[in-house]
Each structure stands twice: as C-alpha cells, then as structure tokens.
Amino acid sequence: MSMIFSGNPLARASAERPGEAWIAARKQAGLFLPFWQNRPFVAGGRAGFRPWDRRWEGATAVFLGLDGAQALFAVEIGGEAEPVLDGGDFQEMRAAAYLLPVADTAICGQAKALLDWHTRHGFCPNCGHATTFADGGYRRICPACGAEHFPRTDPVVIMLPVFGDACLVGHGARFPEKLFSAFAGFVEPGETMEDAVRRELMEEVNLAVGTITYHASQPWPFPSSLMLGCYAQAHSRDFRIDGVEVTDARWLTKAEARTRLADAIEDDMKMPSTIAIAHTLIRDWAG
Ligand SMILES: [Zn+2]
C-alpha cells in the first residue's frame, strides 16, 4: 500500500510553467480544484476538479501539472461561509486523506501546501513590499527589491530506533491519548538528516544510536513538511524519556508490533494510523 500524499502522478512541466502565455492557454481548458480554508473540494469520493467559475475572478490559482493533456490547477476561494458548489463539499484535509484514492491525496497535498504558501507570503520578507505571483505559482517576486521567493518544503526527520528484535516507540505530550509512534523533529540549519536523528533521539529519550538508514519519505502538507523516514540502530536498550516532549516510551518486539498494527490488542496503547509514515516504518520493519 502506498502512503497518502505520495506518488503524485502529475507532470509538473517546470520548463513550460514560467511562460505566462503558456499558463494562460492551459487555464482556458483547465480544470480547477477549489480550496476553502485549506480544505479541498471533494466530489464523488475524488478530488473535485471542475471548470473555471466566473465567481472566482481574482482568486489565486496555481498550476498543479498535466494529467495527460489535461492541465490541472487549484484555486483558493475566500470568504467566511463555506461556498456552495454542486456535487460535493469542502472536507478537512486529514479526513479527506482517508477517503480519497492515493493519487488524489498527493494532488490535494501539493495544492494545499502551495496555496497555503501564497496565502502567507504576500509580502517580501526582505523589504516588506507586496510580492507578485509568477511561474504558475512556483515563485513570487518582489517588484521593489527584486528578491525572488520560492515555495518552502521543511524537512522533518522521523525515526524508529531498533535494537535486535525490538523497536522503540514513544508517546508524545501532544499526541492523542494512548498513541505510541516513531520519534520526529525538524531538521535545523546546519544539520544533516543523520545529525537531526541523533540529536532528537538524544533530547527526547536520551538514546544513543549508531548507523542510521534512510527508508522512505512522505510529503506532509501541514503546512509544508517533508517527512524523512529512517531507522536508527540503538547502541543498547537503555533510554530515559525527557518527560516534556515524550512522556512514555516502550520497546516492542516484531511479533508484538505486527499484532498491534493489526489492531488485535485492546489496551492502553495505539499504533499510528495507516496514513502516517510512522505506520509504514513500523510495518516494514516488523515484516
Ligand atoms: Zn522586497
């Protein structure tokens, strides 16, 4: 099973999309995915693409890519009240991710991250002047100081410490009740991915690790992270929770992890849901 928000099928046409005439021509026959307050429009169990609506005049529309010959865009619809559109409704992104085909979750995630970036980058961080839209949505330019701004992607390490036949999972202070998962944190300036894995595990559970192995990544559009999934070989089973970010942690054997991922044990411990890369890390390791 592929992870949600990953496996985006669209051709992004990065060579063509800086051309304003090219984008304008694609818009003429384009289909548009409406977003309202970071929620995608969902219709018939799919991402609800539809033709341009005159009511959207002036709204930010970003180019997502080509699906075959079909150009796809996303459009940000403002307003306090939920807009009424035929055949579907606006759904919270996480909830929608459970329902939609995986390819649609990837497209919705791309659209959400990109639209959200435009919403929050209307002004130049260099000089404060209003910025202008360019490259179909993949660049903003400051007409006052000439600075160019590009959509952000923030790397986050997410790692499963392993030792022999066991892996360590933790309960974060901000997690839902009973949830135990992999450990995670933002990569800081000047760090490699491996540095960030080591630092986070030392800070959160005082666990020393050796070899770090990259496994898989997942775009996570809340608002614009890229989760870098790793395994970290622990030097021993000795750990000590920090009691602040992590309030509990336990070693699980492969057999127990498999049973728990199948939801076969009803107790005070829950595994990450299938939409999260933490689930994939534990499942792929447990076999
Ligand atoms: Zn500027």
Image: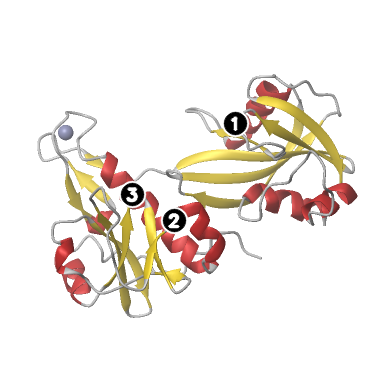
**Is 105 located above or below residue 246 in the figure?**
below
**Of residues 176 and 68, the one drawn nearer to the viewer in this rendering:** 176
- Which residue is found at the position 63% from the left and 50% from the top? 277
Q: Quadrant of residue 234?
A: top right
Q: Which residue is mark 1?
A: 174
Q: Amino acid at mark 3?
A: Gln
Task: Specify which label sits upstream in the sequence, 1 or 2.
Answer: 2
Q: CA distance from mark 2 to mark 3?
A: 14 Å
Q: Which mark is nearer the camera, 1 or 2?
A: 1
Q: Which residue is mark 2?
A: 109
Query: Can residue 89 be spotted in the picture?
Result: yes
- Which residue is found at the position 85% from the left and 41% from the top? 252
Task: Specify which label sits upstream in the sequence, 1 or 3.
Answer: 3
User: Along the horizontal axis of the image, is 150 left or right of 177?
Assistant: left
Q: Which residue is mark 3?
A: 37
**Of residues 118 and 268, the one drawn nearer to the viewer in this rendering:** 268
Q: Amino acid at mark 2?
A: Gly
**Of residues 59 and 236, the one drawn nearer to the viewer in this rendering:** 59
Check disc 1 and report its element: helix, strand or loop.
Answer: loop
Give the percent coordinates (x, y) of residue 245.
63, 24
